[in-house]
Image: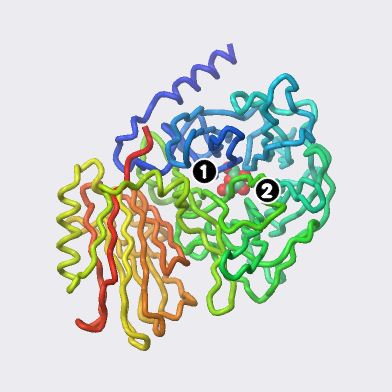
């Protein structure tokens, strides 16, 4: 009977949204129905299919009953044709919190079904366990598929595989294969203590602690969540670094949720930060970029990579649930993922930074087509550029006209100072302002962008971020925006990003270039407008 009730509610969860609702993302992943937060267990299987799990409440549109949803795409990170709903269901007394996935090529875990020619896929997740008398413990657990990702089994006979008895804040394991020592490595957070702990294992089942990372000056009241550790190389300079991402909440650049990163080295045991005075590097400076995590890299631990694919949850804990203000006005779902992003290094004037720019290979490419790409050059004035943009948008079928990517490069003489930007999602009395200011700082202003969650100041009052781009002496100011039904992802100088939710009707689809530079003091090298396709069902 209990089973029947459970199954029937799951069936209801499968029905629901038709992906044409107000504010429904058209190429960013959102669940058909119900609540979503962090991406979990990202990996590309041996047949080339992309798997994305996600924190999911199968029973409602607020956080709770945390389970892992599961989406699969055969070709890229956008056409999530199979949303298989729940892969790992919460159990009585245990919610399934965030974690990662690996392909166990050498069957170190022994989970392989020897009659099939496919390695085991293993999920490593946090169990959020309620004990008697209301106690809580968070511990690390395994689940696996030995049939190529069709079915997933919790390793019930051996779980948890790692615990610190009675520890309530031990979560979000990120596991990768580290070739030099031929070991699995786990980065996992001791969140209230703002520490990342490192463990190693031969078989994913027995773990030994090897080190921990913390910073000297901690932020009061902040938790560290969802650590990610990657080895990146800059293809041009050959500079190679390990980058540790930690998702901090509060303590993001905007209010509450955000992603900090640290640059340094990993010696197989622990992460060592290079310059301990660098405490405020953020991977994204917007309000809605959290719990970022990367795809499992089969050779990641052996060689540094120029690009590593990742996805973040596009929201912020400070307003995503109902507080004194209404939550994001979406129904019957709440929550969506960022555009797939690539971690990369950016070297500027000898200093090393980490970036999360749009993924081209498996995300932008499938969305672009030559007949929907418009390159505007030889633009003598801003107003002519804006007229051309406007007529291009008007000539598009309305279903697609608001799904846009705009890239613009402004040019000016070194030593000349001005502000540049683009206004997006423009309609009557509605617009979102993307700006680089004279002092090279950047901002996105969504205070007049439509529904502001009941005027929630945390939603409306976004901070301006200083940058290290020398906009006075550089000639080019490049700005790029990727726009979906309820998001604006803005990229500056192929470097800084600001990711924000914006809730406005899709008819507010205007775009305008903007500057306060004097006529004759700047030019537009080019503006490229691309109309993107709907990929969600
Ligand atoms: C991050 C997080 C994780 C946790 C999960 C629970 O957003 O708080 O630390 O595992 O969400 O849903």
Asked whether the viewer can see residue 88, the reply is: yes
Density class for disc 2 (Cα within 10 Å; few <14, some 14-19, many ≥20) is few
Q: Is mark 1 within 8 Å of ligand 1?
A: yes
Q: Residue furthest bottom?
A: 415
Q: How many marks?
A: 2
Disc 2 vs disc 1: which is toward the camera?
Answer: 2
**Looking at the image, residue 237 lies above or below residue 224:** below
- Residue in view at x 33 percent, y 57 percent: 455
- Residue in view at x 36 percent, y 36 percent: 331
Going from N to C along the chain, the mark reached first, 2 or 1, is 1
Q: Which residue is the site of mark 1?
A: 37
Mark on residue 299?
2
Image quarter for residue 151? Answer: top right
Seen in the image, is 294 located left or right of residue 425? right
Secondary structure at numbered mark 1: strand
Density class for disc 1 (Cα within 10 Å; few <14, some 14-19, many ≥20) is many
Residue 97 location in percent, x, y? 63, 40
Residue 310 or residue 88, whichever sits in front: 310
Colour mapping: rainbow
- Residue in view at x 43 percent, y 62 percent: 498
């Amino acid at each position: 009977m209990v089973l029947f009730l459970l199954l029937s509610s799951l069936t209801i969860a499968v029905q629901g949204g038709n992906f044409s609702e107000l504010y429904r993302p058209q190429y960013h992943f959102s669940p058909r129905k119900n609540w979503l937060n962090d991406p979990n267990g990202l990996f590309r299987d041996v047949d080339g299919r992309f798997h994305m799990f996600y924190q999911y409440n199968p029973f409602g549109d607020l956080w709770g009953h945390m389970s892992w949803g599961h989406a699969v795409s055969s070709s890229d990170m956008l056409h999530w044709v199979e949303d298989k709903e729940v892969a790992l269901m919460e159990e009585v007394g245990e919610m399934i919190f965030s974690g990662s996935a690996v392909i166990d090529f050498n069957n170190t875990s022994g989970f392989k079904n020897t009659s099939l020619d496919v390695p085991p896929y293993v999920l490593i997740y946090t169990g959020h366990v309620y004990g008697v008398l209301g106690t809580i413990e968070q511990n690390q657990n395994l689940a696996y598929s030995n049939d190529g990702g069709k079915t997933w089994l919790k390793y019930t006979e051996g779980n948890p595989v790692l615990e610190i008895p009675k520890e309530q804040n031990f979560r979000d394991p990120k596991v990768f294969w580290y070739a030099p020592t031929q070991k699995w490595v786990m980065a996992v957070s001791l969140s209230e203590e703002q520490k990342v702990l490192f463990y190693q294992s031969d078989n994913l089942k027995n773990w030994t602690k090897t080190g921990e990372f913390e910073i000297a000056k901690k932020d009061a009241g902040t938790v560290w969540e969802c650590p990610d550790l990657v080895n990146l190389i800059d293809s041009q300079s050959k500079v190679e670094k390990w980058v540790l991402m930690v998702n901090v909440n509060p303590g993001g650049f905007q209010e509450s949720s955000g992603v900090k990163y640290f640059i340094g080295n990993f010696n197989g045991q622990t992460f060592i930060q290079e310059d301990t005075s660098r405490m405020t590097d953020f991977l994204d400076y917007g309000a809605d970029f959290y719990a970022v995590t990367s795809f499992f890299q089969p050779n990641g631990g052996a060689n540094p990579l120029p690009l590593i694919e990742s996805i973040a949850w596009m929201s912020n804990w400070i307003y995503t649930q109902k507080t004194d203000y209404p939550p994001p006005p979406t129904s019957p779902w709440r929550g969506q993922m960022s555009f797939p992003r690539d971690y990369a290094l950016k070297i500027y004037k000898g200093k090393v930074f980490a970036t999360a720019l749009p993924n081209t290979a498996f995300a932008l490419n499938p969305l672009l087509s030559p007949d929907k790409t418009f390159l505007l050059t030889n633009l003598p004035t801003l107003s002519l550029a804006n007229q051309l943009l406007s007529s291009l948008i008007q000539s598009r079928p309305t279903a697609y006209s608001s799904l846009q990517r705009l890239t613009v490069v402004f040019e000016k003489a070194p030593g000349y100072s001005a502000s540049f930007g683009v206004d997006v999602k423009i309609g009557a009395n509605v617009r979102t302002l993307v700006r680089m200011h004279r002092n090279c700082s950047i901002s996105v202003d969504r205070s007049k962008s439509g529904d502001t969650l009941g005027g929630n100041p945390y939603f409306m009052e976004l901070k301006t971020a200083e940058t290290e781009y020398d906009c006075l002496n550089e000639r080019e100011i490049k700005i790029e925006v990727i726009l979906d039904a309820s998001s604006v992802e803005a990229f500056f100088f192929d470097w800084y990003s600001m990711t924000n939710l914006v809730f406005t009707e899709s008819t507010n689809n205007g775009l305008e270039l903007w500057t306060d530079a004097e006529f004759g003091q700047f030019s537009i090298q080019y503006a490229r407008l691309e109309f993107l396709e709907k990929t969600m069902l």
